Image: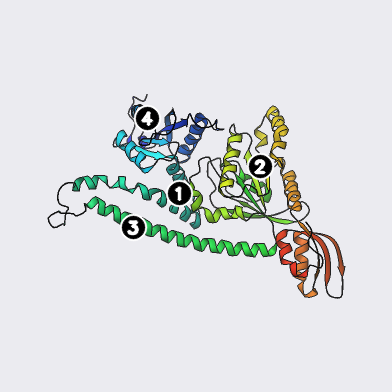
Amino acid sequence: MSDHYIPEMQRESRCYLVGVTLKSAEKALWSIDDSLAELGRLAETAGLTVVGQSSQALESPHPATYIGSGKVDEVKTAAIAENAAVVIFDDELSPGQQRNLERSFGEGMRVLDRTALILDIFAQHAATREGQLQVELAQYEYRLPRLTRMWTHLARQAGGGAARGGAGGVGLRGPGETQLEVDRREINRKVAHIKNELDGVRRHREQYRQRRERTGVPVIALVGYTNAGKSTLLNALSGATVRAEDKLFATLDPTTRRVTLPEGQEVLFTDTVGFIQKLPTNLVAAFRATLEEIAEADLLLHVVDIAHPMADGQMDAVEQVLESLQLSERPQLMAWNKRDLLSNERLALFKAEASRYGDSVLVSAATGDGVPALLAAVEEMLRRQMVEVTVQIPYDRGDLVSLVYERGQVEAESHEAEGTSLRAFVPQRLAGRLARYIVEPVES
């Protein structure tokens, strides 16, 4: 208990965490303690200081206050004792639950849920105009159903008597309700404007993807839990200097780098926003244009922090997001990252279990250890997706011959009267461009 005086500015950053574990739920990979520990990291990333936490086991969340009434009193007492100004819940609260909790905790105590916290972190880290628009859209859509709590004091002022400006006060709305409608219209207007802007971004990205597809360059999308080391790995693979920090959600905007594989094939690696358990659905919707980079990829490189105690839970959370995006069947290679942080015993255990997860490579993005093996594994997986074609390309289309050599593997070449004949393995996208010149059926 804090019995010393804490300045108001410092108190504003002190937060108390609350979580619920459901008795009826199947045994989850994430315990309530693990989930609250992650919530604490999110709070710290947002600039808050965690001063305490509490949890409750329930059959189901309380419809009015999420936690039971007795627990509400207990949390209020503990938060006041710790001079906390913010109480953060580990799940998304309904607008009604949030209003009731704020009423119970009293003025001077803010109530946030996991979704609001993640949105705040995204708002702090969005660097590009696209990222800022995506976060702003998610924030507005989150706030819209929660607007009423902001204007209840005005509605109370107008209650019972005539509304100001009314004639006799019969059947007229109070200023609180009027202000609420104004705010709703304004937010709806802003949401529509942002969606229009994002549609423009999406069209531009689609044009870029189409140009990229015409060149036949394979795309590998890095996916993984936030802070798994995707940006550091992209730097190690490409020699680039993408921002890489030991923070949750340090990277929001997609970054693409060209990389040459061991046998000379050029590919594009794209780093995307990190995932997290209980990722807000409106955030996934807002980042639709960014996540389409994953949907269009030839291969997913799932980066896993194997040194993290919740590595299994993090992998499961990523798979759930991929499944929600209908991408769980996409070819996937596991990059077991941060091997330099593992003891020899744990390293041996992961090597023994690696076969459970299909294609996987142990790597350390920080030291570069395992990077050559990872590039070779990417090359091998892309080779499996190639198709064999025999084509005869007119001599005035030397650009296509060059593309076959750059993007594929040529097995035989001869020069005929009508043009250059090639037998080669090429990416499926390039095979589509060569379809009119194929002289034998495409074979998988």
Q: Which residue is mark 1?
A: 123
Q: CA distance from mark 3 to mark 4?
A: 35 Å
Mark 1 residue element: helix
Mark 2 residue element: loop
Image position of 113 (left or right of 364): left
Tell me if residue 428 comes above or below residue 350 in the rendering. below
Q: CA distance from mark 1 to mark 3?
A: 23 Å
Q: Earlier in the sequence, mark 3 or mark 4?
A: 4
Q: Earlier in the sequence, mark 4 or mark 2?
A: 4
Going by the numbered disc 2, the residue's amino acid type is Ala
Q: Residues within 10 Å of mark 4 (few under 14, many from 20)?
A: some
Q: Give 5 or 114, whichever is nearer the viewer.
A: 114
Tell me where residue 111 sits by quadrant: top left
Q: Earlier in the sequence, mark 3 or mark 2?
A: 3
Numbered disc in front, either 2 or 1: 1
Name the spot of residue 53 as percent of width and height, x first: 43, 29
Q: Give 331 or 13, whichever is nearer the viewer.
A: 331
Q: Give 39 or 164, whichever is nearer the viewer.
A: 164
**Which mark, residue 316?**
none
Q: Which residue is mark 3?
A: 185
**Which mark, residue 68?**
4
Quarter placement of the N terminus: top left
Mark 4 residue element: loop
